Image: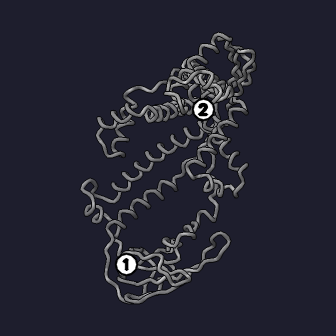
């Protein structure tokens, strides 16, 4: 066997393998023998079919194809064995041909792409300035949560008002009068900022009364109408406890005064701010690293990846659903898949390269700590979680890559130029809140 490098373009090589006449003949003998064992030809026992009869029955093209297939399989396995750690994709057969008893096979080999790093030790990152007002809002929010947990419910006669606690159930009928939804008892606190239509509709209602209202939805260009029947079961006036020293002593053994509780909550808020500030900066650093890195990847590789991803969607039945997200435009979907791969590769390979250059490693103790958290989430013991990742190499790799990415992110932040900026004014529409999904009847 001989091989020649035909061309190289970024991470893709086109290589041609040559097999001489003797190699082809030897493989052909093995193929003929194997076909004899399988051939079911009337008048002959399996394994006893004369070669000339077999060739006549199957045809020379089929035998040649079988010979080529054996060589293709051997070469592909050899490439994976020798280059496996460096390969991004399994090798693809471009072409093969027989010439005077010799065989040529052309492969397209896709290696992991190289990445050109930016000046990663001097990234410029931005963080909004912390504001005293935000810490005070956090303290007030946490204190209100504490009051809400200890609210007193007092049965109430009369009409439902803002702030009341209401028990109700409701059912939904479509235009044909068919019941399509029926709730169990539903508890609602009637708040002004709750934009669900059912909350707005029950204001002014009374215990034992039924409230009826209609809603319309657009579904694939058609308007559908639904009727809601809401039965008011109970109404309670919510009485929030006064926020004072006595209340604090009632709900906590740790604090004696409201001031002590306030100070503790503020410290908690400051720690949370530092944590989210760190996470925000790491995410921003990794995003900037990906944006400024240059990936040496061939369009051939990207085309292969997109083609394989689309095919996988079709096999799993997800294709049409994904296509709808992009106005049923196949090219838009392909572009999204392409960009997702590019961003993933830029982050993955730039993180790996920086880790190698800066000797950043994930220690076994760090994996154990991550596993302890996962074990709690999975509701299994730590020992069981260790067994699970030993059996699942991909799961272990995912954990390792997440930890490595986080450590490289921390390194980038430590070496970055961090600038505090004035917080952006929140968009008025977002500040007022958006209504829930109007296409779900169960939202009410």
- Name the one closer to the observer, 266 or 373: 373
Q: Quadrant of residue 417?
A: top right
Q: Quadrant of residue 175?
A: bottom right
- Name the one closer to the observer, 316 or 111: 316
Q: Residue at x 29, y 35 (%)?
A: 383
Numbered disc total: 2
- Residue 83: image tag: none
Task: Give the colouring mode of the picture.
Answer: one colour
Q: Position of residue 371 (x, y in %)?
A: 37, 36
Q: Position of residue 116 (x, y in %)?
A: 68, 26
Q: Residue at x 63, y 73 (%)?
A: 218
As helix, strand or loop, the secondary structure at mark 2 comes to loop
**Left/right of residue 268 with respect to residue 427 in the rendered view:** left
As helix, strand or loop, the secondary structure at mark 1 comes to strand
Residue depth check, mark 2 versus mark 1: number of the one nearer the observer: 1
Q: CA distance from mark 2 to mark 1?
A: 54 Å
- Name the one closer to the observer, 34 or 363: 34
Q: Residue at x 65, y 58 (%)?
A: 324
Above or below, 373 against 248 in this view is above
Residue at numbered disc 1: 167
Q: Residue at x 52, y 28 (%)?
A: 44
Q: Position of residue 117 (x, y in %)?
A: 66, 27
Residue at numbered disc 2: 416
């Amino acid at each position: 066997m001989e091989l020649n490098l035909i061309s190289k373009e970024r991470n893709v090589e086109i290589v041609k393998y040559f097999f001489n006449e003797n190699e082809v003949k030897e493989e052909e003998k093995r193929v003929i023998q194997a076909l004899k064992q399988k051939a079911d030809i009337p008048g002959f026992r399996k394994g006893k079919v004369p070669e000339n009869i077999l060739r006549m029955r199957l045809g020379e093209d089929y035998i040649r194809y079988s010979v080529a297939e054996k060589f293709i399989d051997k070469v592909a396995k050899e490439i994976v064995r020798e280059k496996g750690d460096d390969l991004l994709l399994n090798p693809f057969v471009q072409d093969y041909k027989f010439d005077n008893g010799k065989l040529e096979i052309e492969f397209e080999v896709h290696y992991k792409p190289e990445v050109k790093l930016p000046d990663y030790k001097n990234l410029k990152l931005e963080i909004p300035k912390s504001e005293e007002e935000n810490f005070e809002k956090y303290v007030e929010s946490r204190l209100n949560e504490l009051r809400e947990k200890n609210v007193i419910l007092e049965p109430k006669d009369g009409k439902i008002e803002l702030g009341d606690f209401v028990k109700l159930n409701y059912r939904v009928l479509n235009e044909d009068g068919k019941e399509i939804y029926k709730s169990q008892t539903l508890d609602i606190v009637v708040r002004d900022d709750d934009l669900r239509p059912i909350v707005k509709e029950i204001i002014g209602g009374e215990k034992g009364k039924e409230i009826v209202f209609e809603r319309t939805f657009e579904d694939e260009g058609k308007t559908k109408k639904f009727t809601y029947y809401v039965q008011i079961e109970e109404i309670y006036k919510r009485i929030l406890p006064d926020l004072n020293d006595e209340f604090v002593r009632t709900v906590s053994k740790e604090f004696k005064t409201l001031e002590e509780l306030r100070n503790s909550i503020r410290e908690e808020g400051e720690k949370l701010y530092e944590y989210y500030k760190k996470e925000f900066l790491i995410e921003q650093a990794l995003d900037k690293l990906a944006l400024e890195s240059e990936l040496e990847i061939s369009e051939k590789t990207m085309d292969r990846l997109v083609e394989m991803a689309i095919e996988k969607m079709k096999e799993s039945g997800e294709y049409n659903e994904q296509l709808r997200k992009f106005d049923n435009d196949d090219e838009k979907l392909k572009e999204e898949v392409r960009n997702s791969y590019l961003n993933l590769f830029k982050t993955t390979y730039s993180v790996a390269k920086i880790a190698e250059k800066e000797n950043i490693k994930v220690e076994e103790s760090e994996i154990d700590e991550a596993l302890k958290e996962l074990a709690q989430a999975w509701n299994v013991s730590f020992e069981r979680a260790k067994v699970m990742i030993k059996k699942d190499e991909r799961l272990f790799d995912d954990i390792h890559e997440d930890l490595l990415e986080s450590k490289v992110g921390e390194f980038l932040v430590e070496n970055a130029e961090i600038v505090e900026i004035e917080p952006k004014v929140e968009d008025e529409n977002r500040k007022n809140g958006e209504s829930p999904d109007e296409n779900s009847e169960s939202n009410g």
